[in-house]
Amino acid sequence: MTLVRWDPLRMLNDEATYGAWVPPVDIFQDKDNLVLRAEVPGVDKANIDVRVENGVLTLQGERKTDADLDDKNAFRRERIFGRFIRSFTLPTTVDASRITARYRDGVLEIVLPKAEAAKPKKVEIQAA
């Protein structure tokens, strides 16, 4: 039996993982909205698709390889290229008809407005 030493970084250099990447995402809320920010540096805006269907927000796109960089002239390749897809189930409190998206400096920001019924309301106390 051959003993194989476990190397946690081995998968980083594995060809099977090449081209598979997942952009990191932050999700937070303010008084009126949920906000999702995804880091997609190097992705052209035209190569990003944002869709909402059946209560699911889906981000997909592709970071294309540099035309002047290939395995023959590269000393080191650490950046990951290829397609990505992320899906998020939206809470029922989101008004899907008013969702907006903006892309700037490699960050995709999606604003998910809360439905009016989901916003907190102050209840007046009446004298009896």
Image (cartoon, helix red, strand yellow):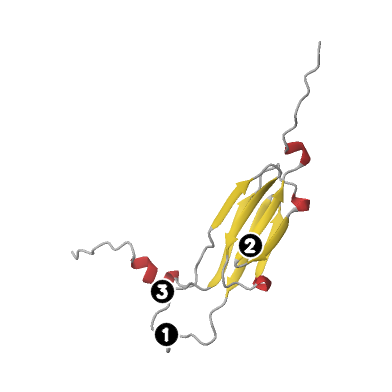
- Estimate the x, y position of residue 39 in percent, counting from the top left: 56, 63
Identified by mark 1, the residue type is Ala
Relative to 89, say whether 75 is above or below: below
Relative to 62, say whether 110 is above or below: above
Q: Which mark is residue 74?
A: 1
Gap between marks 1 and 3 measured at Cα: 16 Å
> Residue shown at 77%/37% (left/top)?
117
Tag 1 secondary structure: loop
Question: Of label 2 and label 3, which has the lower sequence position?
Answer: 3
- Estimate the x, y position of residue 84 in percent, counting from the top left: 56, 66
Label 1 neighbour load within 10 Å: few <14, some 14-19, many 20+ = few
Q: Which residue is mark 2?
A: 108
> Residue shown at 65%/58% (left/top)?
109
Q: Which residue is mark 3?
A: 15
Tag 3 secondary structure: helix
Quadrant for residue 49, please give it: bottom right
Q: Where, quadrant-wise, is the N terminus in this rendering?
A: bottom left
> Residue shown at 58%/63% (left/top)?
85
Q: Is residue 92 left or right of residue 9?
A: right
Quadrant for residue 77, please give it: bottom left
> Residue shown at 65%/51% (left/top)?
35
Marks 2, 3: nearer the viewer: 2
Tag 2 secondary structure: strand
Question: Of label 1 and label 3, which has the lower sequence position?
Answer: 3
Gap between marks 2 and 1 measured at Cα: 30 Å
Identified by mark 2, the residue type is Leu
